[in-house]
Amino acid sequence: MRDIKNLYDKIELDGAKSNAIRSELLKTKKKNHIWAVPMIAVLAACVLIMVIPYAKEHIVNAEYKSRRNIVVMYSGKSLEVVINPETGSVKNFYDINRYGSGVELAKVKDGRLYMVLDDEWIDVTDYCSATSYYRYEVEKQNGIKEVIIVGGVPEDNKFGWIDYLYDANGNQFAYISHAPCSGSYCEADWSNEDFDWLDIARHDEGETCHDPECTRCN
């Protein structure tokens, strides 16, 4: 065994063969290095492909949350409101409880008509009649305003209320009411003389009665 090793150690290659072997080894090393570079690039691209949608989703969610507002009206109606952060206008809204929670904003007590806001009772009897109403306005978050109107008389329950929402630019975008109505969609009964205040109030708030002969709408 020792003789074989000694013989192996004495073997010498001429210069040309030695250089040829060295050249082949360098080529192999270079090929392995060139192959490794694209593989690193591919792996990095895969990581970016996975990370970018994740980051984008979080950015979109953050933007959505910044514009998302839950507005609770005095009538108990709740809405999720999406506001344009540049203009303050309401882009869209969604009813959380479409018909409110059964809260009545006008009640009669001891022959007097009251606007009821949470636990506060405001006597509006002297402001209201068959042709007049009381208007209450309060500012909520992000410039949104809530307007509550009570009209009519306490006798024979000839009274009612409307609860409006306006955006920061004064555009009405939602309302709920308790007033005389008719038709399958409970449309306002504009012809009821006991509720002329309703006709007047809605016109004052910019609504139309869809009457082609109405001088206030046309």
Image (spheres, rainbow, N blue to C red):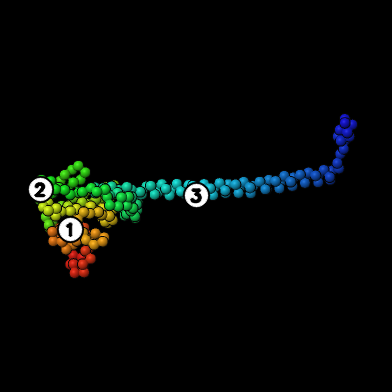
- Label 2 element class: loop
The nearer-to-camera label among 1 and 3 is: 1
Q: Viewer-proximal residue, 173 or 60? A: 173
Quickly name the residue at label 2: 111
Residue 212 shows up from this direction: yes
Q: Viewer-proximal residue, 105 or 16? A: 105
The nearer-to-camera label among 1 and 2 is: 2
Judged from this view, the residue extending furthest toward the top is 2
Q: Position of residue 114 (x, y in %)?
A: 15, 47
Residue 153 shows up from this direction: no
The label shown at residue 53 is 3
Which of the two discs, 1 and 3, labels the residue nearer the N terminus?
3
Q: Position of residue 206 (x, y in %)?
A: 22, 60
Task: Tell me the quarter of the image containing the C terminus.
Answer: bottom left
Residue at 53%, 48% in the rendered image: 50
Task: Tell me the quarter of the image containing the N terminus.
Answer: top right
Q: Amino acid at mark 3?
A: Pro
Q: Position of residue 19 (x, y in %)?
A: 81, 44
Mark 1 to mark 3 CA distance (whole Å) = 52 Å
Describe residue 151's horizontal placement relative to residue 74 as left or right. Answer: left
Describe residue 68's horizontal placement relative to residue 161 as left or right. Answer: right
Mark 3 to mark 2 CA distance (whole Å) = 64 Å
Residue at 33%, 48% in the rendered image: 69
Describe residue 60's horizontal placement relative to residue 91 as left or right. Answer: right
The label shown at residue 198 is 1
- Label 1 element class: helix
Alpha-carbon neighbours of circle 1 within 10 Å: few (<14), some, or many (≥20)? many
Describe residue 20's horizontal placement relative to residue 124 as left or right. Answer: right
Q: Amino acid at mark 2?
A: Gly
Q: Amino acid at mark 1?
A: Leu
